[in-house]
Amino acid sequence: MKIGLIASEATPFAKTGGLADVAAALGKYLNLAGHDARLILPLYAQVQRSHSGLQRVAHLQDIAVALGPHRYRFDGWTARLPGAEATVYLLDCPALYARSGLYTQDADEHLRFLALTRAAFACFQRLGFAPDILHCNDWHTAFGPLFLRASHARDPLFARTRSVLTIHNLGFQGTFAASEADALDLGTRSHLLDPGDLRTGYVNALRHGILYADAVTTVSPTYAREICTDARGMGLQETLRQRGDALVGILNGVDYHEWDPRVDPWLPLHFDPARLGTKAELKGRFLARMGLIAGARTPLLGIVSRFTAQKGLDLLFDPLPELLASRDALLVALGSGESLYEEFFAGLQQRFPGRVAFHRGYSDELAHWIEAASDIFLMPSQYEPCGLNQMYSLRYGTVPIVHRTGGLADSVQLYDPATGSGTGIVFDHFDAPAMRWALATALDLYAQPDTWEHIMRNGMAQDFSWEKQIGEYVRLYERLIS
Ligand code: ADP
Ligand code: GLC
């Protein structure tokens, strides 16, 4: 099959979160499964041009894109995804992508990604690439399915193209003022815009993707059910329910060439269930580097997160300092975002010198080290479409504490002392008492070395590989084009 993927980020080119890991993995593992996947991305100013082996594509120069009154010019570059032959096209348009971050609060934020989506079609036309599947991701590219119907209905290149929208996070919907709708250039097909949206005065990009994609996926089966409820649908539950069976949940996979302690390229030493001593050695080196002081058996708790309300860090505000004050435990946290969370971790570091290390910012290297060196990984997300770090943690023998929601519920099982089954600590209620229970339970289990090692081994034996998960997408694509 020929698959045209469009996304706003993908590793190793541009990343703020899990979407980047998943967009790259889709390209890579579709290619490894024998399909011709092409991935379209913006060439942000932040993309390291020398490092990624970028090459200018002669016939993708000077692509004109009009969004109503707005005019843009794109130049296409290409690169290979590491570990596969899949081709990435990075579309350069400094007027749109030379900004201080990948995402902005600027007034033209919707135009930055509408233009990307339009430019993707133009690219496929210039390349003579007739995709069987157009696979869009999140609000940024959610107008792809509607553009396919409205603007490319008569183009023979796309005559057989079916569309898929994957929702990675319902929390971002890409709404813009209906007065800007002429930027969509729908011409005589303007009636395809959702009348409900137009009445409210705001066009919701994600809603239009949900309405017009041939299939809508989200990144875990539990999240697929949750987003159809009033409690978790974030205003789109009705639209999602309308799509019935066209909405499916496919759990994300893990790229174990990147995230496995056997081969992790960021680690100086490697381990597996037969070499757990090496994990302890890595922990020792890491503690020394971070200036943390441990006793003979002091557990290290790790956090790697985007600091937003979604990630449930509010739950730690009281229980975590209480725990640090009353029990033998260390904490390392990596992340940045909303200031109340940054201040919380900075405050803990000040209050518990030698016991808490907070690194404000983004660091691939530290993220890998935290997965490898920690004993316990904290991921109390309020909601979590899939979540990758808990799955990474399992492979590194780092026992996750998670809230039973979305992909966390689908990938971590509560340890049951009666049967010895389970891979982590899962709490049901999103409140401080549940968080206290989860932390205390983890520390009590950690104090029993044999039991703890058993839980670690249960987790390390889990297989969330993309080699397995990609088959779910392939079967979905096959159903759509048959
Ligand atoms: P989300 O996409 O909602 O942030 P996921 O768990 O799906 O959550 O994916 C997060 C990804 O981003 C993981 O690969 C994680 O290691 C990475 N990540 C998050 N914050 C940081 C950070 N501060 N530094 C490095 N990597 C980070
Ligand atoms: C989003 C979600 C996260 C998911 C990731 C990749 O950022 O918040 O749960 O794992 O996308 O699909």
Image: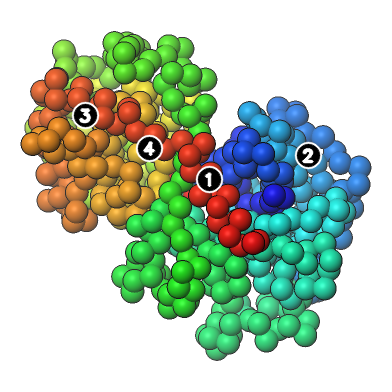
Which kind of residue does numbered mark 4 sit on?
A: Met
Which comes before the other along the chain, label 2 or label 3?
2
Which residue in the structure is indicated by mark 1?
471
Mark 4 in CB contact with mark 2 (< 8 angstroms): no
Which kind of residue does numbered mark 2 sit on?
A: Thr
- Dot 2: element: strand
Question: Residue 391's mark?
Answer: 4
Which comes before the other along the chain, label 3 or label 1?
3
Q: Is residue 289 rendered to the left or right of residue 45?
A: left
Q: Is residue 122 rendered to the left or right of residue 229?
A: right
Q: CA distance from mark 4 to mark 3?
A: 14 Å
Question: For the view shown, which residue lies furthest in the front direction?
Answer: 482
Residue 180, percent from left and from top: 68, 77
Question: Residue 78's mark?
Answer: 2
Question: Is residue 349 positioned above or below 177 on the image?
Answer: above
Q: CA distance from mark 3 to mark 1?
A: 29 Å
- Dot 1: element: helix
Badge 3: how crowded within 10 Å, few (<14), some, or many (20+)?
many
Q: Residue at x 13, y 38 (%)?
A: 416
Q: Residue at x 16, y 42 (%)?
A: 438
